[in-house]
Image (cartoon, grey):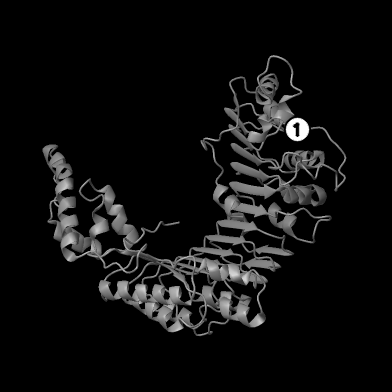
């Protein structure tokens, strides 16, 4: 996600913006400091007429470009590298956050401070990014609407509207019905019309706001490419209307939107390439008719229906359900998985593996399609013997001939409270598969349990091209309870465990085995950000 530069007066809203003289001084200092780069280019005989233009002309050129293209001009030469930051005489990235102890008087002062800053900045001056943490309650509706109108007049491209953390915390404490309604409706759906006036808006983040019923004739957001709704109170119908108003939407993130039940992406959203759904606990179905979708990431309770019109186009899929269940819920997930013929990056949780083993035998022909899979991540919320059998079952049913990277997240708890078998699966021998192209294996929270050792032996014996096996152990592994029973000659349990791992048979003689408490993040899965968010 694009990072926002913090406003120079975000910490103290009573400060005035920098004067024009200081801005010109900054511009001149930048020109002088970058002049060496220009002379260097000239000495080398490079004929760069564009760079030789006066700074005022080059700044005018940058002022006509969208933010992302203005930043890219930094690759032209050293004289262009930071020039885009000076294209406006006032800061073009603003952040307004209220104090943590937001009483009525503090909220009033916060609103007054924002008004002072915007007034001093003046009308019509371009804004690249605007972040506003909104004060709770409906009493500031007129102020918020005025800020949105100001942002629209300044051509804002990246807009974030977030209900203040204090207000979000209040809604989770089960207050009275009236108070809860006032907090959650911190911004009414009518403000979406003000947002629609931002004709240059490319990225929009809405958190904690009420968008349950925007009108069917909502104005189109023709420039919006990225939309993120976080803890937003949005209904199924409202979401469909919002998506329909964004014909060029590329990426949609839905996080903790608890009113959603049936998420529908129609064929009209042909440009949508990425859909992320996290923690939408009431969701039952997801139906995607967009032929352009390439990335689908889902974390939460399993849905009853996953429907993709073009599943063979998906290349990046993340499916995770964090909580253990006594029985597998009804879902068509296994059928949907079997249709991912071109997936390249795949993340599955232990419950997904149970689905595959329990139902995949009945549809074994559907699991011969992972010929393009390059990276696999397994999120093992539990790691009893049954779960090891599920991993074996997955590789037996789902052949992955081109797999290059394997990441395994083991449970973080040391005692593994789910060690009892709640789903009885008969023990079986490791599958006869070959990981011909597997080069990288990384296992987090490795504790040396018997089932974890069994997994390592299996992988070492099958990966003929393995270059690195990295195991990150928890710091508790070197505690007294693990060190008291080790053999003589080893300073701690970690060294004892490392010696055991080095004695295992390996299909790849040159494979490097690393067991450490410290993770240098040299190898990280593609979905690590999604996993941390979930």
Residue for point 31% across, 74% down: 116
- Quarter holding residue 208: bottom right
Instruction: Mark 1: give few (<14), some (14-19) or many (20+) Cα within 10 Å.
Output: few
Q: Is residue 126 visible?
A: yes
Please tell me whether residue 357 is drawn above or below residue 436 in the rendered image: below
Which residue is tagged 1? 449
- Mark 1 falls on what kind of element? loop
Give the x, y percent position of residue 215. Answer: 53, 85
**Residue 3 at x, y = what percent?**
41, 56
Tell me which residue sits at (65%, 65%) in the image. 280
- In the foreground, 146 or 456: 146
Give the quadrant of residue 233: bottom right
Considering only vertical position in the picture, is 518 above or below 333? above
Seen from the viewer's position, the closer of residues 332 and 186 is 186
Write the residue at 36% across / 59% down: 6
User: Do we see residue 270 in this rendering?
Assistant: no
Residue 452 % position (x, y) = 73, 34
Report the side of 476 relative to 295 (left or right): right
Q: Is residue 324 left or right of residue 513?
A: right
| Front-most of residues 229 and 402 | 229
Q: Where, quadrant-wise, is the C terminus in this rendering?
A: bottom right
Q: Residue at x 74, y 24 (%)?
A: 484
Location of residue 382 with respect to 21 vertically, above or below? above
- 210 w.r.t. 60: above or below: below
Q: Is residue 77 left or right of residue 500?
A: left
Judged left or right of residue 145, residue 356 is right
């Amino acid at each position: 996600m694009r990072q926002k530069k913090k406003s120079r007066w975000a910490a103290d809203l009573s400060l005035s913006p920098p004067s024009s003289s200081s801005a010109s001084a900054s511009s001149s200092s930048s020109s002088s400091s970058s002049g060496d780069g220009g002379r260097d280019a000239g000495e080398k005989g490079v004929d760069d007429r564009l760079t030789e233009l006066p700074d005022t002309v080059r700044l005018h050129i940058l002022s006509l470009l969208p933010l992302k293209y203005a930043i890219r001009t930094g690759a032209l030469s050293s004289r262009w590298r930071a020039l885009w930051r000076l294209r406006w005489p006032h800061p073009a990235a603003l952040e307004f956050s209220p104090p943590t102890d937001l009483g009525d008087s503090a909220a009033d002062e916060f609103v007054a401070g924002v008004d002072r800053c915007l007034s001093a900045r003046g009308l019509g001056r371009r804004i690249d990014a605007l972040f506003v943490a909104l004060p709770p309650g409906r009493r500031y509706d007129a102020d918020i609407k005025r800020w949105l109108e100001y942002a629209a007049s300044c051509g804002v491209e990246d807009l974030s509207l977030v209900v203040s953390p204090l207000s979000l915390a209040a809604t989770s404490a089960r207050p009275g019905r009236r108070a809860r309604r006032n907090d959650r409706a911190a911004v009414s759906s009518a403000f979406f019309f003000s947002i629609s006036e931002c004709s240059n808006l490319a990225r929009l983040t809405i958190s904690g706001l009420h968008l349950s019923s925007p009108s069917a004739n909502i104005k189109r957001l023709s420039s919006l490419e990225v939309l993120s709704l976080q803890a937003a109170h949005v209904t199924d119908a409202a979401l469909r209307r919002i998506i329909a108003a964004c014909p060029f939407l590329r990426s949609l993130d839905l996080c903790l939107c608890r009113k959603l039940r049936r998420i529908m992406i129609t064929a009209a959203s042909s440009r949508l390439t990425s859909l992320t759904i996290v923690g939408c606990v009431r969701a039952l179905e997801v139906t995607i008719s967009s032929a352009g979708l390439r990335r689908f990431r889902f974390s939460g309770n399993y849905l009853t229906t996953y429907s993709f019109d073009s599943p063979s186009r998906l290349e990046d899929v993340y499916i995770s359900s964090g909580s253990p269940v006594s029985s597998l819920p009804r879902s068509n997930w296994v059928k949907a998985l079997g249709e991912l013929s071109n997936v390249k990056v795949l993340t599955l949780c232990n419950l997904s593996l149970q689905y595959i083993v329990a139902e995949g035998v009945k549809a074994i022909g559907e699991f011969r399609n992972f010929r393009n899979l390059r990276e696999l991540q397994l999120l093992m919320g539990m790691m009893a013997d049954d779960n090891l059998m599920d991993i074996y079952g997955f590789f037996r049913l789902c052949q992955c001939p081109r797999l290059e990277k394997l990441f395994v997240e083991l449970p973080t708890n040391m005692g593994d409270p789910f060690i009892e078998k709640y789903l009885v699966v008969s023990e079986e021998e490791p599958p006869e598969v070959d990981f011909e192209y597997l080069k990288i294996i990384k296992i987090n929270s490795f504790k040396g349990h018997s089932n974890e050792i069994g997994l390592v032996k299996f992988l070492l014996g099958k990966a003929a091209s393995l270059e690195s096996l990295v195991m990150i152990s928890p710091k508790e592994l070197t505690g007294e309870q693990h060190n008291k029973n080790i053999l003589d000659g080893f300073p701690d349990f970690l060294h004892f465990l490392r010696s055991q791992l080095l004695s295992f048979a390996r299909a790849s003689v040159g494979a490097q085995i690393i067991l450490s408490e410290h993770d240098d993040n040299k190898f990280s899965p593609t979905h690590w950000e999604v996993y941390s968010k979930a």
